[in-house]
Image: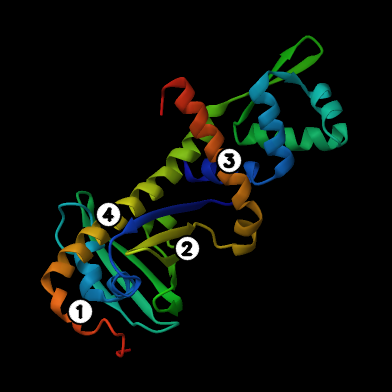
Amino acid sequence: MGEYQLDTVLSAVADPTRRAILDRLRVSDARVTELAREFPISLNSTSKHIKVLERARLVERHVRGRDHVLSLRAEALGEAVAWMTQYREFWEQRLAALEAFVLADADADGDVDTDTASGAER
Amino acid sequence: MTAVVTVSRRIAASAERLFDAWLDPKSLAVWMRRDGSAPSGAVADRRVGGAFAITMHDPNGSFVHAGNYTVIDRPHTLEFTWRSAATHQTDSVVRVTFTPDGDATVVEVRHELLPDAEAVQRHTEGWTEIIDRFAATFAENGEA
């Protein structure tokens, strides 16, 4: 996933109205006019939000006659989640290593730990 | 734009011991590294405003992770900025908290991947919901 693409995805989902639109499209495809009716915002404002979602490739528009039908394209969000998952894995591995380190270390200098347990130091 | 990652682990050691392991460069060199790799190079100026740099060696090469300490509150909270190739050398913020839990300590890492802290605060909830929901979706589809 390109960096610019990731930026546009994260910006797109940083807005509650746009998240609500994505949630709505999870249920089923919808026409732009339907969405404008379902949300307490103007058609114009709805269109602007949809354009942002389209730019992030989270939403696809199909023109059927006079209807513009929108459908959710979950892959783009999945890619953003995958990017975040890398960080989660990074820190999970580090914490596992920290655990291994302090537990091994506790065996090595357990006596010292006991001596200073009353906490006078530092 | 915003993204926040939170990871926690309950470890059978005191908060002080864990806090010190996180702040001491000699300890960092041992555990802050890729599995099976050589020890990291670690230097740390352990005061608020002080800088640290950790060079991790992984199969693709050596990568420097660097930042500055912003909160040093032993043994409760450690907070620092975090820059690396993965953050495109822009500052993200990592906050590590140590919470005693019986004879163990819960260590929580909260990594806010953003230069704009206000945006993170405003949008963290939304992201968390989205992630949870999509994780659930993937699980339902058996793709997780």
**Residue A72, percent from left and from top:** 62, 25
| Separation of marks 3 and 1 at Cα, in angstroms | 52 Å
- The disc placed on residue A9 is 3
- The disc placed on residue A114 is 1
Q: Is the residue at mark 3 from the same chain as the one at mark 2?
A: no
**Residue B50, percent from left and from top:** 40, 82
Mark found first going from the N terminus, 4 or 3? 3
Question: Pointer 4: what residue?
Answer: A96
- Where, quadrant-wise, is the N terminus of chain A in this rendering? top left
| Nearest to viewer (mark 1 / mark 4) | 1
Residue occupying image coordinates x 40% and y 79% = B74
Amino acid at dot 2: Thr
| Separation of marks 3 and 2 at Cα, in angstroms | 19 Å
**Residue B119, percent from left and from top:** 64, 58
Residue contact at pointers 2 and 1, CB within 8 angstroms: no
Q: Is residue B90 left or right of residue A43?
A: left
Mark found first going from the N terminus, 3 or 1? 3
Is residue B126 positioned above or below B17 on the image? above
Residue contact at pointers 4 and 2, CB within 8 angstroms: no
**Residue B131, percent from left and from top:** 53, 39
Residue occupying image coordinates x 83% and y 38% = A45
Is residue B51 positioned above or below B134 on the image? below
- Where, quadrant-wise, is the C terminus of chain A in this rendering? bottom left
Residue contact at pointers 4 and 3, CB within 8 angstroms: no
Residue occupying image coordinates x 48% and y 23% = B140
| Nearest to viewer (mark 4 / mark 2) | 4
Question: Pointer 2: what residue?
Answer: B90
Residue contact at pointers 3 and 1, CB within 8 angstroms: no
Which quadrant of the structure image shows residue B109?
Answer: bottom left
Which quadrant of the structure image shows residue A71?
Answer: top right
